[in-house]
Image: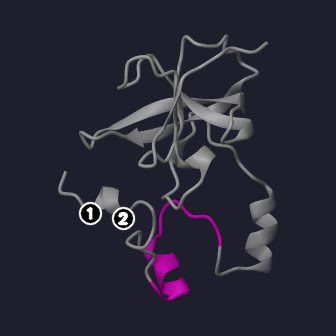
Amino acid sequence: MQFPIQILRDTGASQSVILSDVLPWSKESFCGYNVLLQGIEMGYVPVPLDYVYLCSELVSGRFKVGLKPSLPVKGITLVMGNDIAGGLVRPVLEVFDMPERHYSSDILEKDFPSVFPACVVTRAQSRRLGDMIGLDDTVFAPIFSKDL
């Protein structure tokens, strides 16, 4: 089933967003997680992601889009961000309600003991690894650099 939409290309948007009442969304279209979007007011909002098939002059294919009840420009149905149309941007932070355990990381940990997932670095881990692990060179740096 196809639905006509009005697209606004936003080169400042890292994530594409569509009005939530435009299409019949379902459990099958839901990606299973949300993304954190930061608006012009510098606040963060969790937004659910769904798959949509988009056919336009610029791009066509299956894409993940955020669902919002309203958009900042009247008459626009989809704000097309750099995730669909391209461009160099920082990745959007993905937030899972139910984190998944990937058992393949156990094998990687054995093969590459210096690189493994960790939520906390204990003093014992720090002594064992030798160097402290910081977030200052990750996508989280802008969030943690602010005085909250």
User: Would you identify the image quadrant in which residue 123 lies?
Assistant: bottom left
Q: Is residue 127 magenta?
A: yes
Q: Amino acid at mark 2?
A: Ala
Q: Give the quadrant of the N terminus.
A: top right
Do the numbered discs 2 and 1 sit on residues whose CB atoms are within 8 Å?
A: yes
- Residue found 65% across the figure and 76% down from its top: 115
Amino acid type of the residue that numbered disc 1 sits on in the rendered structure: Ser
Magenta-highlighted residues: 116-131
Mark 1: which secondary structure? loop
Front in this rendered view, residue 144 or 105: 144
Residue 87, given in percent of the width and then of the height, sits at: 55, 58
- Numbered disc 2: secondary structure: helix
Q: Name the mark on residue 108.
A: none
Residue at the spot 48% in from the left edge and 63% down from the top edge: 120
Image position of 121 with respect to 119: above or below:
below
Identify the residue at image location x=78%, y=75%: 110
